């Protein structure tokens, strides 16, 4: 593991078992990307020409006709939507988002309007798009989408995420079929997805990925897909995309991360991560009030996580208090706690340096032993988490 500079900056040395979360720095950047970024930083390049080189690499790995690198997947949503509305009309591009073309409506299933740190629909509205929600939170039927498409429909956005409702909604193939029958392009937000080809293969016109999550590149977004639509999205760099620009190092770093992805020993990584999961399960099995289950990823990424279910009466601590204790301890362990009010959280092994899996196991045992030794059940109201969730950011900077 490289030298840890965090103590010199006064930063907590957190261990990430939450996953590829932007709030924690997303991922461990691969050495190839680090080397590429360092090699290009001293030199001048013509950015558009470098983006053309990136386009070729993106097209090869995604199966799209073209691609480019932007600031983030969220930026990619805004740029793709803007491109679907403005086309290559440079004056229209300059006037967004205040002046929008008549064709400005963007369809999204209600069960897909989630937050990845900001609302999905806000990324559409930033471009000047008018969000048209279809269906209900737990159900979308064909007629919801078919009847929502009008002459004002510019695009339809489909979100692939563990946050979305995962039942009762239109799947991507059906979503594409309905949209394409009326000439509406489909934009897929696949920020945290492992498969770089499947969404375009299933008919999406544009697929958007984070360069800094499973790929292990610098903070960035990747726009890939049909050449004309990608070009229209790229032209937004002369408009709303100016504030979403990336430098030469990010573009070249993403290119290197993509090429490293081709050579990566994916099977070997899965085997190592399975070893971590089994270690944690052995550590937890047999402990009072704790159930450990190894479960597949909900969006079909080729990986597994450990779900830790807590019976507070037996374990003497709630799931959320255990998550908080792990985060506050030494070293801090940050778990995947999006559903902790249901008495469980997850441990994700994908972002560990060698040896950290043992530290995680020891900290789990330590906190559970401490709770069992308590005469009272450690149980703070779950409402406290909601009440104080944003205290840190609202106080920033202290």
Image: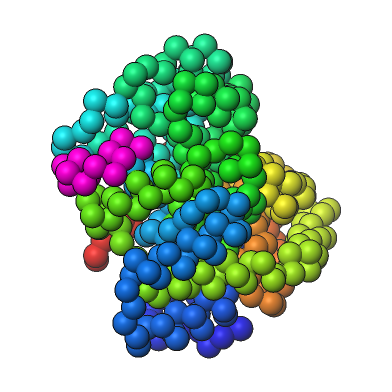
Give the percent coordinates (x, y) of residue 335. Answer: 58, 56
Give the percent coordinates (x, y) of residue 141. Answer: 56, 15
In the image, taking residue 71 as reference, residue 25 lies left or right, namely right
Query: Is 129 rendered above or below residue 50?
Result: above
In the image, taking residue 141 as reference, residue 85 lies left or right, namely left
Quick one: 195 or 153, which is closer to the camera? 153
In the image, taking residue 83 as reference, residue 55 lies left or right, namely right
Q: Can residue 7 be seen in this view?
A: no
Query: Is 147 rendered above or below residue 295?
Result: above
Give the percent coordinates (x, y) of residue 155. Answer: 40, 31
Q: In which quarter of the image is the C terminus?
A: bottom left
Is 317 magenta? The answer is no
Q: Which residue is drawn at 30% across and 52% down?
A: 235
Q: Is the magenta stretch mostly helix, strand or loop?
A: helix
Q: Residue at x 45, y 79 (%)?
A: 37
In the image, taking residue 281 as reference, residue 191 lies left or right, namely left
Quick one: 84 or 166, which is closer to the camera? 84
Magenta span covers which residues? Answer: 84-96
Q: Can residue 97 be seen in this view?
A: yes
Is 90 magenta? The answer is yes
Q: In which quarter of the image is the N terminus?
A: bottom right
Tell me, what colour scheme is on the image?
A: rainbow
Query: Is 327 rendered above or below residue 308?
Result: below
């Amino acid at each position: 593991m490289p030298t840890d500079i965090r103590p010199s900056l006064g930063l907590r040395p957190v261990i990430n078992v939450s996953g590829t979360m932007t709030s924690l720095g997303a991922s461990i950047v691969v050495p190839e990307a680090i080397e590429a970024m360092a090699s290009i930083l001293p030199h001048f390049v013509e950015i558009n020409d470098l983006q053309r080189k990136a386009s070729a690499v993106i097209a090869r790995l995604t199966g799209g006709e073209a691609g480019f690198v932007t600031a983030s997947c969220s930026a990619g949503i805004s740029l793709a939507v803007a491109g679907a509305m403005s086309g290559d009309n440079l004056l229209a591009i300059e006037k967004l988002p205040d002046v929008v073309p008549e064709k400005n409506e963007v369809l999204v299933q209600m069960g897909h309007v989630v937050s990845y740190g900001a609302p999905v629909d806000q990324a559409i509205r930033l471009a000047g798009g008018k969000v048209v929600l279809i269906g209900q939170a737990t159900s979308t039927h064909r007629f919801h989408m078919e009847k929502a498409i009008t002459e004002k429909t510019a695009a339809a956005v489909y979100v692939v995420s563990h946050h979305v409702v995962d039942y009762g909604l239109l799947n991507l193939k059906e979503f594409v079929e309905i949209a394409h029958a009326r000439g509406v392009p489909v934009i897929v937000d696949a920020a945290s997805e492992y498969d770089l080809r499947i969404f375009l293969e299933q008919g999406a016109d544009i697929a958007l990925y984070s360069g800094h999550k499973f790929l292990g590149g610098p903070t960035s977004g990747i726009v890939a897909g049909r050449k004309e639509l990608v070009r229209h999205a790229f032209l937004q760099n002369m408009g709303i995309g100016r504030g979403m620009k990336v430098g030469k190092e990010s573009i070249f770093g993403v290119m290197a991360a993509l090429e490293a992805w081709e050579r990566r020993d994916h099977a070997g990584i899965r085997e190592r991560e399975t070893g971590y999961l089994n270690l944690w399960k052995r550590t937890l099995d047999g402990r009072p009030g704790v159930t450990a289950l190894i479960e597949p990823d909900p969006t079909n990424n080729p990986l597994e996580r450990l779900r830790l279910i807590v019976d507070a009466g037996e374990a003497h601590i709630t799931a959320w208090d255990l998550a908080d204790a792990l985060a506050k301890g030494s070293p801090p362990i940050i778990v995947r706690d999006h559903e902790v009010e249901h008495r469980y959280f997850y441990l994700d092994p994908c972002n560990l340096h060698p040896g950290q899996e043992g530290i995680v196991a020891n900290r789990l045992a330590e906190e559970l032993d401490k709770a069992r030794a308590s005469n009272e059940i450690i149980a703070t109201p779950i409402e406290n988490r909601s009440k104080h969730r944003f205290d840190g950011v609202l106080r920033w900077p202290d």
